[in-house]
Image: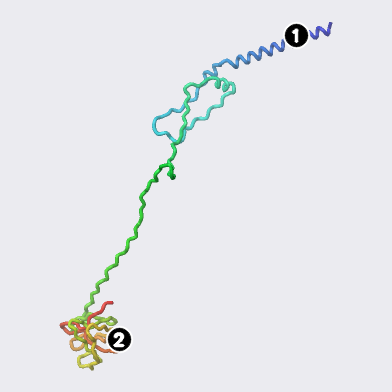
């Protein structure tokens, strides 16, 4: 009898425990499945305002969302969020100038310096310097170390003498247009300017540059 009573009491206690667990489980399931005011009244995050105008290539930064409890996440996942917009910014494709796609490369002007051919400069015109070599003679146009030639206007030769002066010994003639080197001078004699010259042919002596009316020996510019 004692054993049977203990068995009956154990079975009753076990049935009561199972009933209590079933009631608690049903209550939890019912509570979770029902919407709660805390979830429905939670403020929705502000959405960015889409403005008209050129679209920026970089999206507007959004403030990081505040972490919510797991219970609210489950309830929110069951409720659709009205009015939420998602904007996707896609940059326009850049044109590629590759052969075969119909794109024509754009030609840009370049600054090319064309080397100019220098034009030859005209040869300077040399004017013989005129200076007073002798008091009673015509101005001279020659200097020691220069080159000279016998004038062709009139075409007359110049006499070459051993020293300056009409009374000096005659050595030879310099023909019209013939060039000479002026070695020394000037010396004033007989109202004329005399120069020591070399015709490069062995004739070396003194000859007159001219008289008061004309030049017999003219400078050569080379």
**Element assignment for label 1:** helix
| Mark in front: 1 vs 2 | 2
Q: Quadrant of residue 28?
A: top right
Crowdedness near tag 2: few (<14), some (14–19) or many (≥20) residues, C-alpha within 10 Å = few
| Residue 5 image offset from top left, x and y in percent | 81, 7
**Element assignment for label 2:** loop
Q: Quadrant of residue 218?
A: bottom left
Is 110 on the left-hand or right-hand side of 190?
Answer: right
Residue 51 vs 205, above or below: the answer is above
Q: In the displayed orientation, state which residue is furthest to the front.
A: 100
Residue in the image at 20% along x and 93% along y: 167
Q: Quadrant of the N terminus?
A: top right
Which residue position is annotated with label 2?
A: 200
**First in residue order: circle 1 vs circle 2:** 1
Q: Which mark is residue 12?
A: 1
Residue in the image at 25% along x and 88% along y: 206
| Residue 172 image offset from top left, x and y in percent | 24, 91
| Residue 198 image offset from top left, x and y in percent | 28, 86
User: Residues at badges 1 and 2 in contact (C-beta under 8 Å)?
Assistant: no
Q: Give the distance between the C-alpha atoms of the residues marked 1 and 2, in whole angstroms.
A: 160 Å
Residue 168 vs 50, above or below: the answer is below
| Residue 176 image offset from top left, x and y in percent | 22, 84
């Amino acid at each position: 009898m004692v054993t049977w009573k203990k068995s009956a009491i154990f079975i009753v206690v076990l049935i009561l425990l199972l009933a209590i667990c079933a009631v608690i489980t049903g209550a939890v399931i019912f509570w979770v499945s029902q919407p709660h005011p805390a979830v429905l009244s939670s403020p929705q995050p502000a959405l960015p305002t889409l403005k008209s105008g050129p679209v920026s290539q970089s999206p507007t930064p959004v403030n990081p969302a505040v972490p919510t409890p797991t219970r609210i996440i489950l309830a929110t996942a069951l409720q659709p969020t009205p009015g939420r917009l998602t904007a996707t910014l896609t940059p326009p494709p850049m044109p590629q100038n590759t052969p075969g796609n119909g794109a024509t490369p754009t030609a840009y002007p370049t600054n090319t310096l064309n080397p100019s051919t220098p034009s030859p400069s005209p040869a300077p015109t040399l004017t013989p310097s005129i200076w007073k070599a002798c008091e009673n003679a015509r101005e001279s146009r020659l200097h020691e170390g220069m080159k000279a030639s016998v004038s062709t206007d009139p075409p007359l030769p110049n006499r070459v003498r051993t020293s300056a002066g009409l009374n000096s010994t005659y050595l030879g003639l310099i023909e019209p247009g013939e060039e000479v080197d002026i070695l020394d001078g000037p010396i004033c004699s007989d109202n004329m300017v005399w120069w020591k010259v070399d015709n490069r042919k062995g004739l070396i002596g003194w000859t007159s540059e001219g008289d008061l009316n004309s030049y017999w020996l003219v400078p050569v510019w080379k």
